[in-house]
Amino acid sequence: MGETKQSRVEETLDPQDWEALRALGHRMVDDMLAYLENVRDRPVWQPIPDEVRAHFRQPLPVEGEDAATVYEEFLRYVLPHPQGNIHPRFWGWVIGTGTPTGMLAEMLAAGMNPNVGGGDQVSTEVEGQVLEWCKQMLGFTRQASGLLVSGGSMANLVGLTVARNARADFNVAQDGVQQSTRRLTLYASREAHSSVQKSVELLGLGNDALRRIPVNAGFQVEIDALLDAISEDRARGYQPFCIVGNAGTVNTGAFDDLNRLADVCRDEGMWLHVDGAFGALAALSAPLRPLVAGMERADSLAFDLHKWMYVPYEAGCVLVRHADEHHRAFSAAGAYLSHAERGLSGGALWFSEYGVQLSRGFRALKIWMSLKEHGIEKYGRLVQQNVEQARYLAALVKAEDGELELLAPVPLNIVCFRYRDARAAQQQSQLNRLNEELLARLQESGIAAPSSTVLDGSYALRVAITNHRSRREDFDLLVGKVLELGRELARETASGTSRPSVSGT
């Protein structure tokens, strides 16, 4: 006998007590706004205690807990141990800070919970509007297509996929790269981001197809060396198809001469892809705009809004000059995804046909709300403010020339420097070990969080400023702490009491 209507129990994940959840939700919002408001009062970063790490080795939950109990666990074990990038003195890698309204927009987007792959829904209209604004912001052609993606790595992959398919002399989508009779090659400076290499490998071209071109003293690509490499590859019977230009390298913030690269691509029949992960947004500041001259001539442009527009993660973008080539690279037929003239399957724009993802979150809402709240002129002022702060830090470093050394030019918002013991003759390896240990202690102190890089063999403390909360006093504090730790390490080295370096060398 089948089950009766009375015996059948159908469940839901909605709360049984909406009022209790509403009260908890209000508490969460209040707690997180207070967390942002008082961020300056906390350490930037601190090591995760062993007991916290151990807490995240629990078995899979079988029975559920009350939402308020789970939230208390979050407050105790998760919230106190962040990466730290919302702090005014976080300057590691190139990571943005987010904003309070951006946080709330994420909640709204999750509440609506659309799949922005396509169909006749307002979320696609919002993304379309954001993409139009991005073209305007960066001086890109209004006829271009675009896509919001997770970040610069995916934006580079999308742009280079279109480049490969559009410039190959065979049907890559149909036949695959193994059908090429001539090796496809592309070119970037040795300062190009590692995501370019990942893209080349994922596209089946192989790491050896990426020609890494030398740079000059300003860490810009050497145009003569680039032209020589292209000529040599043509002589070998290869097919040069793309140049990747840098609009703000991740190491030093250097800009390639994008107009020269655009001229080379025009003359050679090649595709110009610009990686402007954060540097493209220099276009928002009138004094900085000359740095990106020629960017508007790119065939594809990758950049992030979660870096120098301070939007919460994830928010990247790619723009492609040739909308038909963009669509051709990613569209795939499927009866279950057929378009209709009317109904939910209508809608002119299906973003799933312009990128890898069919399932796509509502990234556009936080960008749309942020731009509406602040306006583009304020973003331009903040970009300029970060650059002026970098120049201020560089001046502080130069003022301590006996103990601090600037290791690269500062064309934008990245400052690379190191501590050196002026009282002792030190080899490069000793200086590298000292600065590596200095950075670890600086981060562990909770005072500030730069990251590091290596420039011409020198280990550098690398300060990348994409932080709307930073003030000049924060850089005074940074320099003071670096000098304090450097002197402490120099004394330890002289007395033979120094701890092993963080790399164990």
Image: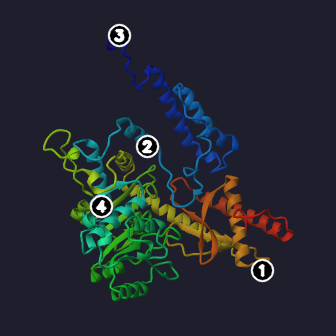
Contact flag, marks 1 and 2 (Cβ < 8 Å): no
Mark 1 or 4, closer to the camera: 1
- Looking at the picture, which amino acid does disc 3 mark? Gln
State the residue at coordinates (71%, 60%): 481
Residue 498, label in figure: none
> Looking at the image, is mark 4 or mark 3 earlier in the sequence?
3
Viewer-nearest residue: 410 or 199: 199
Colour theme? rainbow
Q: Position of residue 47 (x, y in %)?
A: 67, 49
Determine the secondary structure under disc 3.
loop
Nearer the camera: disc 2 or disc 3: 3
Dot 4 crowding, Cα within 10 Å, few <14, some 14–19, many 20+: some
Drawn side of residue 260 relative to residue 464, left or right: left
Give percent across and percent down for residue 157. Answer: 38, 63
Mark 4 or 3, closer to the camera = 3
Q: Which residue is mark 4?
A: 135
Identify the residue at image location x=59%, y=59%: 472
Q: Which of pointers 3 and 1 lies earlier in the amino acid sequence? A: 3
Q: Is residue 56 visible?
A: yes
Tell me, yes or no, whether the two marked residues, 3 and 1, touch with CB atoms within 8 Å. no
Q: CA distance from mark 4 to mark 3?
A: 59 Å
Q: Position of residue 131 (x, y in %)?
A: 30, 55
